[in-house]
Image: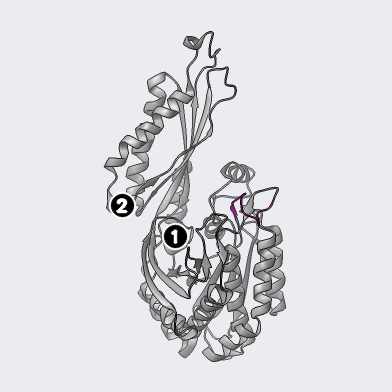
Amino acid sequence: MKAKVCAAIDAWAAKVEALAQDIEREPELGFKETKTAAKVTAFLQQLGLAPQTGLALTGVKARVVSGRPGPTVAVLGELDAIGCPDSCKADPQTGAAHACGHNLQVATMAAVACGITQSGVLSELSGDAVFFGVPAEEYVELAYRNKLIKEGKLHFLTGKGQLIYEGAFDDIDMAMQMHADKNMPAATVSIGESSNGFIGKTIQYVGKTAHAADAPDQGINALNAAMLGLMGINALRETFREADVVRVHPIITKGGDLVNSVPADVRIETYVRAKTMEAIEATHKKVDTALKAGGDAVGAQTVIDTMPGQLPLACNNRLNELFVTNAKIAEPNVAVKDAGHFSASTDMGDVSHLLPVIHPFIGGVDGFLHTADFHVVDFKHAVLLPAKAFAMMIVDLLADDAELARQIKAEHHPLLTKEEYIAKLDKYFQ
């Protein structure tokens, strides 16, 4: 069966690569991936599937049924691009570019679908496979997304969070997703165990305008308040425990209106990241205190809006081990690395609180993520290798009456129920 799924992936490799390139040519930001979703839908329809569309606005979900009862295994691919306007492949209007390799994720997911549907192995498996193009992993354009929430089109700010809220993961028992590595041109798989989570904040300092030269004493300088708030955050850094992997990285998104007027409206945006939700909770409260102190120091009003971001990732060890085993079958010379914990974040962390998941990093690419230098070096290693590993994992999980998948499902202890997850994220909006 494994030989058959790999042969089917090789047979469709040229079409899969064309899909990846087509998506790369028209990058779209989160919850706006209409062209990308249409391309994924058309590809899955070529395989004889009838995908659902419009999930979390742009998500595409196709189910393959074996005909025998058993768990459902999903392979995910993220539809959105990141803002990278200096990329030569960026959209000139939006600055969006696939500088994070999400087009490679979608191609991997599509290749797995080719392997499972075109190989004829389904008749020997128990359970279902789901191929899921998911929107809006990148946490960007928050004003736009908050507008969608106010319009009743969204409940949460990230794609997988919204899909969880809508119930799109209710019929999935475990999920797999790869991510492109950085500066890793060789055939390599890096097995991650965990990642930081974060919450987002927007901060507005409201001062009082006045003539900057003639009557500065009559104004309240909101920019000075912001600078003091940022200095307060920097003063806190020595209190961040190394074990918590805390990252706080604010930017000023508005520094005033006119140079000749005392700034009265200054705005900041930041994430508060850490390895655990407990560390995030403790840190973001200290950050709020520092930010408010900046406003209090000059008499400005400090308005802090905290929003749910992404939960820390927790990968399933047995699925990780199974991926390594099959990656070595797909490419005997592949290098296997222990990625351990990574300090960035992904909304796959949200899914990992409910289901067993994995999120390996894959070579065949070069350059840093989110930069204009990121590019594919070897499509075979970047896409076909993980696709074959995932497809062979599905065979392992669902063969023999899905004995292995049933074991993993029975042994897994979710960190949150769906109801607890929704309540946890909702509280930040309050």
What's the residue at 45%, 69% (across, down)? 360
The answer to whether residue 409 is visible is no
Task: Please state if 52 lies on the left or on the right of 394 as rendered.
Answer: right
The span from disc 2 to disc 1 (Cα, nearest Å) is 16 Å
The residue positioned 57% from the left and 86% from the top of the image is 5
Q: Residue furthest top?
A: 214
Badge 2 marks a residue whose secondary structure is helix
Question: Residue drawn 61% across and 84% down?
Answer: 10
Give the prevailing secondary structure in the magenta stretch: loop
- Residue on which disc 1 sits: 349
Is residue 398 depicted above or below 217 in this figure? Answer: below
**Residue 19 visible in the picture:** yes
Residue type, label 1: Gly
The first of marks 2 and 1 along the sequence is: 2
Residue 411: % across, % down = 35, 75
Q: Assess disc 1: are there few (<14), some (14-19) or many (≥20) residues with their C-alpha within 10 Å of its C-alpha.
A: many
